Image (cartoon, helix red, strand yellow):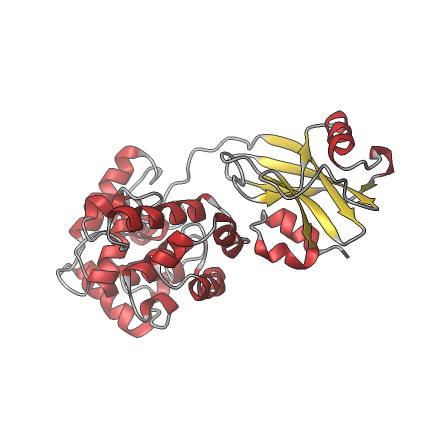
Amino acid sequence: MSLFASRLLLWFERDGRHDLPWQHPRTPYRVWLSEIMLQQTQVQTVIPYYARFLDALPTLPDLAAAESDHVLALWSGLGYYARARNLHKAAQVCVAEHGSELPREFEKLSSLPGIGRSTAGAILAQAHGDRFAILDGNVKRTLARFHGIAGYPGSGPVEKKLWEIAEQHLPDERLADYTQAIMDFGATLCTRHDPACMLCPLQDDCVARREGRVEQLPEAKPGKPLPERRTLMLLVRDAEGRVLLARRPPTGVWSGLWSLPEADDHDGARAFLSRHTGADFDAADVLPLIEHTFSHYRLHIEPMSWRVPTAPPAVGDNNDLRWQPFDRLAELGLPAPVKKLLGSLTP
């Protein structure tokens, strides 16, 4: 066992997290669900969503058989909804092709939607004790600092080097504990900002600390200004306390979720209202601007609100539009800014 791994395991025994819900028991399904939720999301945020999801869909076959809207509703608020859609697709593949279980073979597991090399390694190491490395953001940061690896960790050559190092440090036993340890270490000690170097069990051999480069490593992705986009969101409510929702397209941002209807400009909004609701565009209440930032652009949302006495008979529940009661919004997956907006309103 390398000195890196042995010190990390000693630290984990004393200071690591041993009471996370997916650790008891560490079944493949529970570990897989946690790994997907933890992508781009911190542990304390994930735990209540994880408990709710597992309570509703306790097994892989339950997930595979669930309606897409139900899965997205359970995920609503976690963001990065492609994770939920891929989770659902992967469960259906497992039922159809792998006996309703996650495959034990690395190649088959890593080829499932939304899994990939690092997540497959995490599942096999934690659920089965198999000897596979992981390389999530926490691990990249830890290894880049400890070994003094320059360059952006997401670039091909740097990532290849980090994979080699990650595999070199793997112990021959206690793979589940080691995998949790290296993730915990990056999440709680070797953090992105203000790392606790004075408490670090690896500090004596850390290149970044020795060379005064802790704050510089890992290097950030070469940046460029985020593009700005604008949309009008049309909030139409009827006398029965229902709100008109539109399903997002199957690809792109918030794909498959239910959201407020949108328009690029006032002419488009006026045409939509005339066709579907009968609301008078000029009678709109203009609500406060909402700004929502994605990884690849910044969206400026301009909400406009109308009340209509009755829902026109031409608009019924269908694949694209539906009138949803306010007290049943939790049944649907809603984008975070839309969920927040609707939650602030009186039906």
Quarter of the image for residue 303 reads top right
Q: Position of residue 108 (x, y in %)?
A: 22, 45
- Name the one closer to the observer, 152 or 315: 315
- Name the one closer to the observer, 110 or 318: 318
Quadrant showing the C terminus:
bottom right
Report the residue at 73% width, 51% height from top.
Answer: 242
Q: Residue reaching furthest top?
A: 267
Quarter of the image for residue 331 reads bottom right
- Name the one closer to the observer, 71 or 43: 71
- Counting the numbered discs, the total is 0
Q: Position of residue 145 (x, y in %)?
A: 31, 50
Q: Position of residue 151 (x, y in %)?
A: 33, 37
Report the residue at 31% width, 40% height from top.
Answer: 150
Report the residue at 28% width, 69% height from top.
Answer: 11
Left/right of residue 271 with respect to residue 207 in the rendered view: right
Q: Position of residue 91 (x, y in %)?
A: 34, 50
Residue 270 appears in view: yes
Quadrant showing the N terminus:
bottom left
